[in-house]
Amino acid sequence: MIELEVTNENTYIDLHFHYFLNDENVHSMDAEIFNTCERQLIQAIKNQHKYFNESVKIEVFAKKTGGIIDTLRVISENPLIHSVIICAITAFFTAKFVSKKDISENTKNKIENFKSITELIEQGKLNEEIFIQLAHKDKDLLKLRSEFFKVAKKENKITKLDVESPTLISGRPVFDKITVLYKQFDNFIIPDIKEETPSENEVKIYIIAPILVKGRRDNWKGYLNNMPIDFKVSDKEFLEQVHNHEIKFGNGSYINCLLKTISTLKNEVFQPIITREVVNVSNYGEDNGFVYIVKRKKKHINEEQTSSLFPDIN
């Protein structure tokens, strides 16, 4: 539960992030992991200024023992900023967002009527349930959250993480303590999802920058349907002829090929990463010029295989 009561009695909110370690006598963890995690938290908090025309100040306190306790103080004269940041922190450490079937009819109507958190703030109709539902579409928040838990998972001393605030509003904590067990970290990490489209045959690619030196792993550059693309070539016989300078490229050079395309998505949150691979080149040429078939080595059948195909007939 989050206290969203608007009050002017606080100009700051303290946030405690307590990393519990597997040995109660150990009070240290990998510095690079800690700093990277803290950076994701600070950025997630600072990103909430996009809903207001004022900045947020964040102070860092000396680390406390008892595992590792990281304390951040969020300072603002605007109590609404406190409410939004508390909601954002709750969303950050809540693996499963509110599902559509769990949303009340009243909340559904508000979400349909308001396009953004900014509109809800302006109308004074923001609540925890709506914020967390809308935050599900916040790509920046999801990316920072995923990176936080991906990095934190590398520290195998961590057993769990508690998030809480000692700050009180009207005598009550601003939000209930949140606990995330180490074994639950994967629930927060956005997985890579690879989708391979069916290979396209006889695709015409105009060559802009071929890789002519054997051993280089750079992508080739070309144009496909008037769009610039990067691609790899795995056709070994074609590559051998390119490296031996038997095949040369000039203005208007193209290849007709079998093209494999793979799209990698991060849970549909980020722009897809497209990778292309030329599996087989059938022919090549230049505009208004000859078309050349790629030379292929003949596949030889050894004598034993040949004789077995035609057994003696007595």
Image (spheres, rainbow, N blue to C red):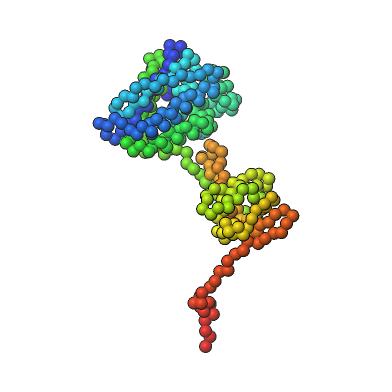
Could you say which is closer to the camera, residue 158 or residue 240?
Answer: 240
Quarter-wise, where is residue 64 in the image? top left
Q: In this view, does 285 lie above or below 26?
A: below
Looking at the image, the residue that sits furthest to the bottom is 314
Residue at the (56%, 48%) spot, across then down: 219
Q: Is residue 148 above or below residue 228?
A: above
Residue at the (52%, 81%) spot, across then down: 311
Tally of numbered tags: 0
In the rendered image, the quadrant that contains the N terminus is: top left
Could you say which is closer to the camera, residue 224 or residue 74?
Answer: 224
Looking at the image, the residue that sits furthest to the right is 288
Quarter-wise, where is residue 271 in the image? top right
Percent coordinates x, y for residue 226 in the rendering: 68, 45
Residue at the (38%, 15%) spot, across then down: 171
Is residue 19 something that shows in the picture?
A: yes
Percent coordinates x, y for residue 262 in the rendering: 55, 48
Percent coordinates x, y for residue 28 in the rendering: 31, 31
Q: Is residue 179 left or right of residue 146?
A: left
Looking at the image, the residue that sits furthest to the top is 9
Is residue 198 something that shows in the picture?
A: no
Q: Is residue 18 above or below residue 189?
A: above
Residue at the (64%, 44%) spot, across then down: 228
